[in-house]
Amino acid sequence: MAHMIQVRQTGGPERLEWVPVAVGDPGEGQVRLRQTAIGLNFIDVYYREGTYAAERPFVPGLEAAGVVEAVGPGVPDVKTGDRVAYAAPPLGAYATERLMPADRLVALPDGITDEQAAAMMLKGMTAWYLLRRTHEVRPGEPVLFHAAAGGVGLIAGQWGKALGAVMIGTVGSAAKVEQAKDAGYDHVIDLSREDLVARVRDLTGGEGVPVVYDSIGRDTFMRSLDCLRPLGLMASFGQSSGSVESFSPGLLAQKGSLFLTRPVLNTYTAKRADLVQAAADLFEVVRSGAVRIRVNQTYPLAEAARAHADLQGRRTTGQSVLLP
């Protein structure tokens, strides 16, 4: 029988419950998937804790790979037996089987394993929109990317390096410095012992960087603004340390007429054509070897609570996957 992880009350990892579920036949525009690998992401924590709202009870998860078991009416491009992956709403990836809108699926090419796909779709397409759309990284320009040893950071470091950027990454401990360097970062700043702003200014000849990609939030946000050169862009795409405190927009003027954006993947891939392009670009850099996808942790789906605890406790590196 199919099973899922259900959240009836928001809170800590213990709120993740392993329960049986009956998955019906796919409706108009849907397919039924037998899932083979499921991505673990910090956004799953936000939903579990209630930072991001979802009607309860709900099944967390936005990313997985699997095999199409049945196809509903009005689905012209997907057939039974296809290997597919996704990183998109609706919630519900933490399940052994599920129904999924067919237009949110992309076909997996040869050379990409199910575990790789589940580990990279959300993080990899996040790196894609950040580096190729939010701010189009150019050869030779310095880029500051926080959480360089995290899931998105490891992909972004390699991708940014392949684009010719000078990649400056930050990590939270000395143990993660080499991981970030191995992922293509030219310079790695250990926030536990180095002054972020002083180090960035030193690396850029006092100018600062044109763009900061910050998924940490409260702990780094203000210092990140001070790392920007005039007219620089702050891309705040996460809040692993907590929400950014309120501030006056006038602060952006004082610090050099800065730009601020809070981008999310769903906006950049809302149109089917953009989703397909994002996935195609991601598959290309992985298959070419420019970006390596390393699954460093796997957990049984039934032990999702342990996976969440490890993720929040910063005991994971790179990509983690839940296995049904």
Image (cartoon, rainbow, N blue to C red):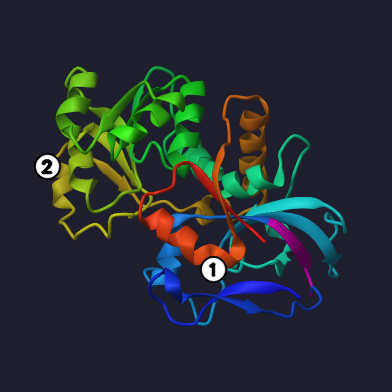
- Which residue type carries mark 2? Gln
Secondary structure, mark 2, is: helix
Picture quadrant where residue 293 is located: top right
Q: Which mark is residue 41?
A: none
Q: Residues within 10 Å of mark 1 (few under 14, many from 20)?
A: many
Res. 53 in view = no
Which quadrant is the C terminus positioned in? bottom right
318 sits to left or right of 90: left
Res. 12 in view = yes
Q: What secondary structure is the stretch in magenta mostly built from?
A: strand
Magenta residue check for 34: yes
Tag 1 near tag 2, CB within 8 Å: no
Secondary structure, mark 1, is: loop
Q: Earlier in the sequence, mark 1 or mark 2?
A: 1
Magenta residue check for 209: no
Which quadrant is the N terminus positioned in? bottom right
Q: Which mark is residue 254?
A: 2
Query: Residue 274: percent from the left, percent from the top?
Result: 62, 46
Q: Nearer the viewer, mark 1 or mark 2?
A: 1
Write down the residue under mark 1: 60
158 sits to left or right of 192: right
Query: Residue 42: percent from the left, percent from the top?
Result: 44, 56
Q: Which residues are magenta?
A: 27-36
Q: Of residues 170 and 143, which is closer to you in this image?
A: 170
Picture quadrant where residue 291 is located: top right
Residue for point 70% across, 47% down: 114
- Which residue type carries mark 1? Pro
